[in-house]
Every structure is written in structure tokens, then in C-alpha cells.
Image (cartoon, grey):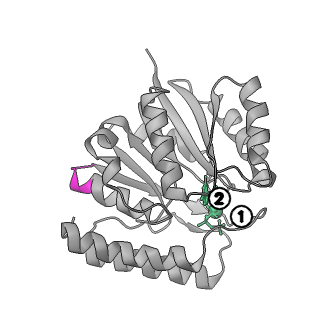
Amino acid sequence: MKQKACIILPTYNEKENINLILDALLKEFELIDDFNMEVLVVDDNSPDKTWETVEKYSQKHPNIHLLLRKKKSGLGSAYIEGINFAIDKLKADFVFNMDADLSHDPKLISKMLEQGKEFNLVIGSRYIKGGGFANWPWYRKLISKGANLFGVIILGLKIKDISSGFRCYSKDIINKTNLSKIESTGYAFLEELLFHCIKNGAKVKEIPLIFVDRTKGETKLNKKEMINFFLTIIRLRRKYGKA
Ligand SMILES: Nc1nc2c(ncn2[C@@H]2O[C@H](COP(=O)(O)OP(=O)(O)OP(=O)(O)O)[C@@H](O)[C@H]2O)c(=O)[nH]1
Ligand SMILES: [Mg+2]
């Protein structure tokens, strides 16, 4: 029997992007033979009604699912609910983190699944050879690079891109890593989950990702989230030591 992979897309006001990303994913899935591919959109009751579009897709495509939450509760909390749903309800063997704003190229999915045969966590990395940014402003690159370097040093991680939001986890590493002990509800969730996966013995592979800046819709990443990223690194080091 084929294994199942579920792409989790958290959305908040992505009306202009959602149909483009869902179409791109459906097209990519046609090229993937050896897995059953599903999409789970976790929408936080977007005021622009992103979820309405997802509902329409889900009526037409049985492999597109919508998890509609009551209010905006953060990227991390959307991912925790999404990952639990994908594994418990959809019976996924692999789960992906992916942005819905076309920053992450769906073409990488099959490459990540290929690596998933050997590694239980595959990361689309902007900081390895072949990876990078297509059109990010210099100040965002600087903050991202600084945050990564800080995390790598303080937490002793041997990973180049600890904040990338494009990842593939196998079910076994998620099951080993107790998601309920994750405290971050926002973007810092990504580094916190990575840290716990590595503490639990994850075999990690990074593959090159060219991150393309969004051309539609607005960013949800604010100053508070950025500060939280640094504070989370300090909290993890104090509570658990180095990875
Ligand atoms: N469900 C849910 N999704 C969210 C929340 N915050 C952000 N997202 C989604 O998470 C993904 C990443 O957020 P972005 O705003 O693109 O963050 P970013 O990629 O760091 O920054 P930009 O691309 O510059 O906007 C997008 O698909 C957002 O719609 C949230 O609170 N709840
Ligand atoms: Mg984005």
C-alpha cells in the first residue's frame, strides 16, 4: 500500500494566494506516483474568507481538507493542530510545513519525500549551497541570518537553516516528539519543534531552497514574533541545555 503525505498550509488572509498554491500543489501531485498526497489547510477564520475558497476546492477534490479554527491563534498553534489532525485523522505517514504564499516551490516536495526514505526530518534550506533568496529585502535577510546564527550557537544545532518553514517530518519523529510540551504558539514554534526533534534523535537532511518573497497579500510576521524567536532560543537553552 502507498504511504500518505500531507502538506499542511496554515492560512490567514491568503485569499489572493490560496487558489494559486492549491492549483500548483494539485498539478505537482500528478507527478508523484509513489505516495498518496493530501493537503490540509488550517485557516484561522480569515476575515478575507480564505476558507471559502478552500471549502470549494475540498468539495471537488477529496484530498484537500480544511481545518477551520475560530480565531487567529498563531502559526505554531495552527501547525500543532494541523499535524495532530494529519497523523491521527488522515493517517499521514509524512507531514509537511509549508507557507501558502508561494514562497516555497512545490517542486521540492518530491525531492523531500525521496530524502524522507532515509531521513526523518527534511528541511528546505536557504543557507546551504544552492539555496538562497530570490527577492528578499536586505534587512529581512540580515534578521533571518542573525536569528539563525544565534540559534545555532546558543542551542548547539548542526543545522544551517533553523527557521525555514518548508519541512517534511516522518510520523515516527513526530510521535517520538511530544508536541504538547511545545510552548511557542507563533513562528518560534518552528525552531522549538526542530530542537525537540533533534533531542529525540532526528536524522536531519537539508536540501537547497530558493525562498521567493510573497508578491500577493500581507506578511503576518511582526516585531513581536521576531523578538519571540530570540527569547525562545534562550528559554530552550535554559530549560533543556544544548541539543
Ligand atoms: N492559521 C494561521 N496561519 C498563519 C498565522 N500567521 C501566519 N500564518 C500563515 O503562515 C504562513 C507564513 O506566514 P507569512 O506571513 O508568509 O510569514 P513569512 O513567510 O515569514 O513572511 P512574508 O512571506 O514576508 O509574509 C502563511 O501562509 C500565513 O498565512 C496564524 O496566526 N494562523
Ligand atoms: Mg511568507
Residue 201 is one of the magenta-drawn residues: yes
Residue 8 image point, x, y percent:
55, 43
| Callout 1: SS | loop
Q: Is mark 1 within 8 Å of ligand 1?
A: yes
Q: Is residue 75 above or below residue 45?
A: below
**Rendered position, 91 above or below 42:** above
Q: Are marks 2 and 1 in contact (CB under 8 Å)?
A: yes
Q: Is residue 133 left or right of residue 159?
A: right
Q: Position of residue 101 (x, y in %)?
A: 69, 56
Q: Which label belongs to residue 103?
A: 2
Residue 149's disc is none
Look at 75% across and 25% down and name the residue there: 59
The residue shown at (64%, 53%) is 71
Residue 73 lies, in percent from the top left, at 56, 57
| Label 2, ligand 2: CB separation under 8 Å | yes
On the image, numbered disc 1 is attached to which residue?
A: 214
Q: Nearer the viewer, residue 15 or 31?
A: 15
Q: Quadrant of the N terminus?
A: top left
> In the image, what residue type sits under mark 2?
Ser
Range of magenta residues: 198-202
Give 72 or 97, whichever is nearer the viewer: 72
In the image, 209 versus 58, the foreground residue is 58
| Amino acid type at image mark 1 | Arg
Vertical placement of residue 237 versus 37, above or below? below
Q: Earlier in the sequence, mark 2 or mark 1?
A: 2
Gap between marks 2 and 1, in whole Å?
Answer: 6 Å
**Within the magenta stretch, is there residue 15?**
no
Residue at position x 40%, y 65% in the image = 162
Secondary structure that dominates the magenta span: loop
Lateral position of residue 197 relative to residue 189, left or right: left
Answer with the quadrant where ligand 2 appears in the image: bottom right
Most extreme residue toward the top is: 1
